[in-house]
Image (cartoon, rainbow, N blue to C red):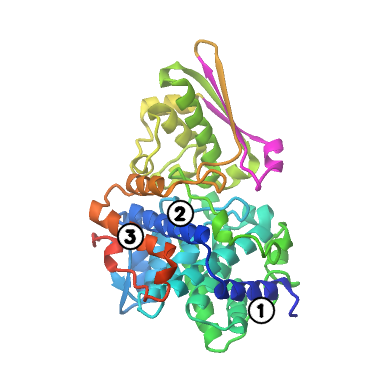
Amino acid sequence: MKDAPEATLIDHLAHLRRKPIVPDTRERLAQALLDWFTAGWSASQTAAAGRYCRVAEDLHPGPGSAPVFGGRAISANGAAFANAAIAHIREIDDAHRAAMLHPGVVSITPVLALAAGGGLSGRQVADAVIAGYEVSLRVGEALGAGHAAGFHATATAGATGAAAAAGTALGLAPAQLHHALGIGATQAAGLWQLVDDGAHESKSLHPAFAVRNGLAAAYAARAGLPGARRYVTGARGMYRLLGGDGPLAALDGGLDAPERLNTATIKAWPCCAQLFTPLDAIRDLLDTHGVEPQAIESVDIEIFTHALKIAGVDWPAKPAETCFSLRYVAARLLLSGKLGIEDMEAPDLRAQDLLAMAGRITVRTSGEFQREFPRLRPSRVVLTLKDGRKLDALRKLRRGDPEDPYTWEALQARMRAFAPAMDDGSAEAIVTWCERFTDAGRDSEICLPPPALFGAAGR
């Protein structure tokens, strides 16, 4: 049993906790935290955030000291549930090409909720977040595209990542941590039927339940309850029963490579990450050629097949569907040269200029592009202009991918753009707090996230 991939992964997590965290990983951790705060602030005052908070308080009643985006302080378990949901509402929390999930929301959320109790050092917080990324991304990569077509991997692989993050934060011994991951895996769920049936407003329950179940799994393991040992590779494990078709070597291979945290993508657009390469291609064409909307005769968008399995809304009927409609986000970008939070939250879906532009857009899938997925996200955009010219752009990588990363300064600008209600003082406090993780000299300090970092109460 010791040589099972799951056991090797546990040994790897223990090794990561023993070794120094290198500067590149520290910087990437600070970026991940800044991204998480950006996502939470961006949605903190929405009606959806209020609904998720009510669910959290119903599930975990009683007072507590863990802050929630929007300013409420409740129990650690309640705050973890609420913050996981809120940070996913805008679809701007980080992503991953191969794992096809949102790792930060399941890795950071439970750790900061537990840290609010004041018992974790900076190094313990860092180790726990890194463990969450390591497990969620390795399990997600192993499960692969076949799994991700039917299941939201943030909810499935994410449950094991949340268990790893919570278990590491709670100081579980390796054997206990293995049990925690096994218990979390048995509670992994998240059907994409949700989007097929137009229930997009409930999508944020997926990371919320993943975090709730990950925390419960860590508590259960701490209490001495056993979990599945071969929770991925066993005859009735995740891989076989949940449609896994990715490389199982992702579980325990490449252990000398940089931590998986370094391979995540920070999102450039406020919509589903499956739609980023066509938006990047449109941005390239607009920047290069200065195309005006009235000059466009037609738009042809060719994209990998999997994208429309997740983001397949032809035209949104409500704001919650805008993130999953390629025709909408492309039309909005072509018309105004930008795509912001306001375009997703309060769209005029019947605006004549918007409908006219959308009517010129043809979307089709490509088997050739699909064969490069999930390693790449290929998309081609061809603009045919009224003067007869054809402008063509092909993108296979997204801005914010590890190969095209943000700078620290650009991430701060992104935070202010995606969270326009954030004031200068709050922005400075968040940046300063995230930057602490780049300094190994602060590892032993108690890491208490101040409530002010989560914004003023508004509900």
The correct choice, above or below, for 194 with respect to 80 in the image is above
Across and down, in percent, residue 268 comes to 46, 43
| Amino acid type at image mark 1 | Ala
Percent x, y of residue 295: 45, 16
What is the three-letter code of the residue carrying label 3? Thr
Which is nearer the eye, 279 or 410?
410
Q: Which residue, given by chain and number where applicable, does mark 2 sit on?
A: 93
Q: Which residues are magenta?
A: 361-385
Q: Mark 2 vs mark 3: which is more N-terminal?
A: 2
Report the disc number at residue 432.
Answer: 3
Question: For the residues carrying marks 2 and 3, which lies nearer the camera in this image?
Answer: 3
What label sits on residue 354 in the rendered view?
none
Q: Mark 2, mark 1: which one is toward the viewer?
A: 2
Q: Is residue 38 left or right of residue 93?
A: left
Q: Is residue 238 above or below residue 245?
A: below
SS state under label 1: loop
Q: Quick check: 348 above or below 296?
A: below
**In-front residue for pair 353/260:** 260
Whether residue 71 is visible: no
- Mark nearest the camera among 3 and 1 is 3
CA separation in Å, label 3 and label 1: 41 Å
